[in-house]
Amino acid sequence: MRSMPLRCFCLALVLVGTLAPALADTVIDNANGYTLNASNELLRFASLAFDDAGRIIAVGDAAEVAAKAPKARHVDMQGKTVLPGLIDAHGHVFGLGDMLTQLDLAGSASLADALKATADYARANPNQSWLRGRGWNQEIWKLGRFPSAAELDGAVADRPVWLERVDGHAGWANSRALQLAGIGDATPDPAGGKIMRDARGKATGVLVDAAQDLVDKVLPKQDEARARVVLDRALERIAQVGLTSVHDAGIGLAQDRLYRDYADHGKLSVRVYGMIGEVGADFDQLAARGPLLSYAHDMYALRAVKLYADGALGSRGAALIAPYSDEPASHGLLFRKDAEVRAMMAKAMRRGYQVNVHAIGDAGNRQILDAYQKLVPQTASGKLRHRIEHAQVVAPADIARFRKIGIIASMQPTHATSDKNMAEQRVGSERIKGAYAWRSFVDQGSRVACGSDFPVESPNPFFGIHAAVTRQDAAGQPVAGWHPEQALSLKEALRCFTLDAAYAAHQENVLGSLETGKWADFIVIDRDLFTMPAHDIHDTGVLQTWVAGRAVFVKK
């Protein structure tokens, strides 16, 4: 059978963003293909065959693949580079959809920019009862402080405004929002949170970590129709950047219900590995029948729990063993006492769930490592592949404990290049040696599962691969890389976004590489990562994204 030209094939692909109808056996020809295998070898291939269910039949040169699928339809890749589908091991799908449908302040270069954007958004959305957004970062603004409610009132005063910081661990409210939330100067700080106050003790309008719950309680509830819009936008964006699987770090009953519904109706265009948020009422209901190992041909799984140890570095909520170098009166915030967090972890472990705990500061990481060291043998749960999410600032002596206890480090490379403007100020020149320390983890043999933490960072995995390899931001700064001794090789970075991310979800036997028997999840990109300068990785464009042998995105 003649190969169908790429231009014609693109026209034939329908339902982009959803799974297209099943095809006959298909062979991808004339590909500049790369994949890793379980032995960490980088393999090349020209052709890839998969059956109508989306399982790979053969990988290799054109003749041997054609022999395994003699009646297949052929698609000519015209020499384009083909890679395994990339996996984001830590994201927030509905959070991404929210950001795409609300005010996005991620590009604001100054307080004045953010205020103007907020005022413009308010004028463009006169019917919204609450104005919501995300993405501001006072460090980029060079304020030397947090913004205030009074400043936000200058942009919008007649309606409540609630703007989450880029990391989601702090929020900025105007006076109307504070009033509706019942927050005044005398309101006490909740456990695990902080109401920022000025020198006179007056609430400034910024709420850190658990203090944000005071506003969350009075926000309008999201109905299912809105949730579907949010999910649709997120799935569309995820496919566009070449992700074929994401680990959703913290979902509840409503999100689980939608994921199953989308999977049932062929609308789930990315594989989702779900983590139940906390171990409260939603966990009790979702866990009634035990972990969901696989649903709808590996499109969805719900076998993990997401917990929190501390906050974030940018808002000084990350828990540190010694005080912050740039704020000696603060150690940050441990969200829970040791006994409480261990009880929560043990509850999930005993029900058969992988436990994934957010820990950013060295005190937060130590608290959770201590808990794992005690609980893993007690619960006989080592095979569950427990994780620490972020593992961002770790005391150097504690890094080896990840390997010893068997804990996966789930890390986000772009956090380093985004945080480099403030991280060393926060922790100082000694503690920074254990921060964003990917090389230290890889060299000791630890599994490192890479992600982005979107929408905190862009979901684009090539930004993460670029950061992992160069330790530079998008502008190529610093020229020599920020603490380049912790950089990864390109092959190591690719593994973190493929096989090791799949391993962190118990899915390495079905995902993460292009090998016979696995799902045909792959992407087509506009350049060859392995022959071009590393600084160009950031600009990689995705041409096509395929999940289970179906195209879910084709660039027009």
Image (cartoon, helix red, strand yellow):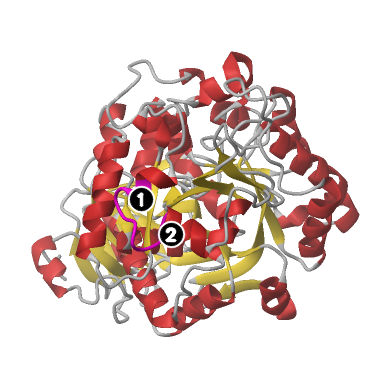
Q: Which one is nearer the viewer's eye here, 86 or 128? A: 128
Residue highlighted by disc 1: 153
Image quadrant for the N terminus? Answer: bottom left
Image x and y of residue 444, in percent: 66, 29
- For residue 176, which numbered disc appears in the image? 2
Q: Is the magenta stretch mostly helix, strand or loop?
A: loop
- Up-down: is 522 above or below 55? above
Would you place residue 284 above or below residue 76 in this image? Answer: below
Q: Is mark 1 on a helix, strand or loop?
A: helix
Instruction: Find out whether the residues at labels 2 and 1 contact each other: C-beta distance under 8 Å.
Output: yes
Magenta stretch bounds? 152-162
Q: Give the distance between the C-alpha atoms of the residues marked 2 and 1, in whole angstroms.
A: 8 Å
Question: Could you say which is closer to the camera, residue 387 or residue 106?
Answer: 106
Residue 212 in the figure: left or right of residue 93: right
Type of amino acid at the residue the image marks with label 1: Asp
**Toward the viewer: 477 or 1?**
477
Residue type pointed to by label 2? Arg
Crowding near the residue tagged with mark 2, few <14, some 14–19, many ≥20 C-alpha atoms within 10 Å: some
Please state if 151 lies on the left or on the right of 375 as rendered.
left
